[in-house]
Amino acid sequence: MAKKQYYGTGRRKSSVARVRLLPGNGTFTINGKPIEEYFPLEIVRREAFRPFEVAGCEGKFDVVAKLEGGGYTGQAGALRQGISRALCEADRDSYRAALKDAGFLSRDSRMKERKKYGLKKARKASQFSKR
C-alpha cells in the first residue's frame, strides 16, 4: 500500500511552491536536489524549516517540493506557506492553531509595483529643474 501524501501550495511575490509531505525522517528534496544544494544560505533554509519547529513535528515528514519563479527569498517564503498548508491537511486539529498564530497560513500579498510611463521606474522620476 502506498504511503499517505499531503499536498500544499504556497505563493510569495512571483514564486510558487507545490509541496508534497510524506511520512518519513525529515529529508528535503527541492526540484530534485537536496535543500543544502538548492538553498546554500543557512538563513533561507531555516525559513523553510520554521513550520516544523512551530508545529513541533521535526523529522516526522519528508518534503518533496517543486519551486518556480522569483528569487530565493520569495521561493523560501512560498515553500514555508506550502509546507504549512500541507501540515494542516495532515492533522488539522493539532497543527493549525500554532501555524496560524505564527502567520504561516496567510498569503503575503505584497508584489512589485509596476513601472509607470514618463518615469524611470515605478516611482523614480528624473530630477526636476526650474531652469
Image (tube, rainbow, N blue to C red):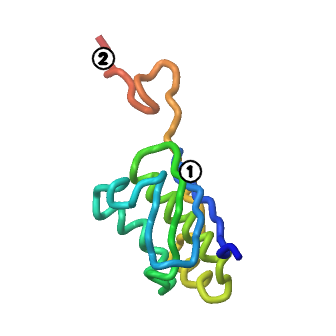
Q: Amino acid at mark 2?
A: Ser
* Relative horizontal placement of residue 114, taking residue 7 as reference (left or right): left
Q: Quadrant of the C terminus?
A: top left
> In the image, is residue 31 above or below residue 124?
below
Q: Position of residue 72 (x, y in %)?
A: 39, 50
Name which residue lies at 40% across and 66% down: 47
Name which residue lies at 54% across and 58% down: 108
- The residue closer to the viewer here, 117 or 48, is 48
Name which residue lies at 28% across and 63% down: 42
Residue bearing mark 1: 16
Measured Cα–Cα span from mark 1 to mark 2? 44 Å
> Closer to us: mark 1 or mark 2?
1
Q: Position of residue 110 (x, y in %)?
A: 52, 51
- The residue closer to the viewer here, 13 or 22, is 22
- Mark 2 lies on a secondary structure that is loop
- Mark 1 lies on a secondary structure that is strand
Q: Position of residue 95 (x, y in %)?
A: 59, 84
Residue bearing mark 2: 129
Q: Residues within 10 Å of mark 1 (few under 14, many from 20)?
A: many
* Relative horizontal placement of residue 66, taking residue 76 as reference (left or right): right
Q: Residues within 10 Å of mark 2 (few under 14, many from 20)?
A: few
Q: Amino acid at mark 1?
A: Val
Residues at discs 1 and 2 in contact (Cβ within 8 Å): no
